[in-house]
Image: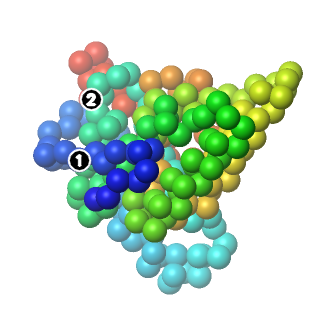
Amino acid sequence: MQPIDFFAKPITTKLTWNDLDLPKDTLSQIHEIEKWIKYSDSLLENSGLRNKIKPGHRALFYGPPGTGKTITAALLGKYNDKDVYSIDLSLVVSKYIGETEKNLATLFDKAENGDWILFFDEADALFGKRTNISDANDRYANQATSYLMQRMELYKGLIILATSAKDSIDEKFIRRLNTVIYFPDTNSEEK
């Protein structure tokens, strides 16, 4: 693993799938993502769909803190021989006009070359609902959000957004996701 200009840090784990305490339906959805990681290239090539559908896979993991979202991202990387990078949103987002987009471009360009899994924790901070435009700041914030959506759709790898506040995420983002998985607090719900 190599550092990527301070915007992200690698995440790994010594845990295994057996260490996760998740309901069967949640695990089933996670294993569907694993199948995409393993077989998407051959499926797209053999079916002739490569030029007809958007590349990559975009997933949302949501639920209370401490329910296994980050560990699941690390396990997907571990068992599929992929580096997983947690994006440091405090370093990506800038108050200066155009800097957020520049930082995102750098991040996605490096990730594309590395075939990494990108993990956006507390995703609602960056993927939040867009505001009505009342001043120039709103216009530039919405512009950064639109740029992020475009880059996500072009990314050929796996992008995982994680949040404990799904309702705060822009609906346009949620519609562009391939998978939305709920991580319940297993101490309060039955499996």
Tell me: residue 168, above or below residue 2: above
Q: Picture coordinates of residue 106 (x, y %)? A: 54, 55
Which of marks 2 and 1 precedes in the sequence? 1
Q: Quadrant of residue 167?
A: top right
Does residue 138 appear to the left or right of 188 in the view shown? right
Q: Which mark is residue 12?
A: 1
Q: Which residue is the site of mark 2?
A: 191
Query: What type is the residue that disc 2 sits on?
Result: Lys
Q: Quadrant of residue 160?
A: top left
Compare residues 2 and 13 and report the one nearer the observer: 2
Query: What type is the residue that disc 1 sits on?
Result: Thr
Q: Picture coordinates of residue 108 (x, y %)? A: 53, 56
Compare residues 67 and 3 and report the one nearer the observer: 3
Kindly tell me whether residue 93 is visible in this rendering.
yes
Kindly tell me whether residue 162 is visible in this rendering.
no
Q: Residue at x 50, y 23 (%)?
A: 165
Q: Which residue is drawn at 57% across and 49% down?
A: 104
Tell me: residue 85, above or below residue 145: below
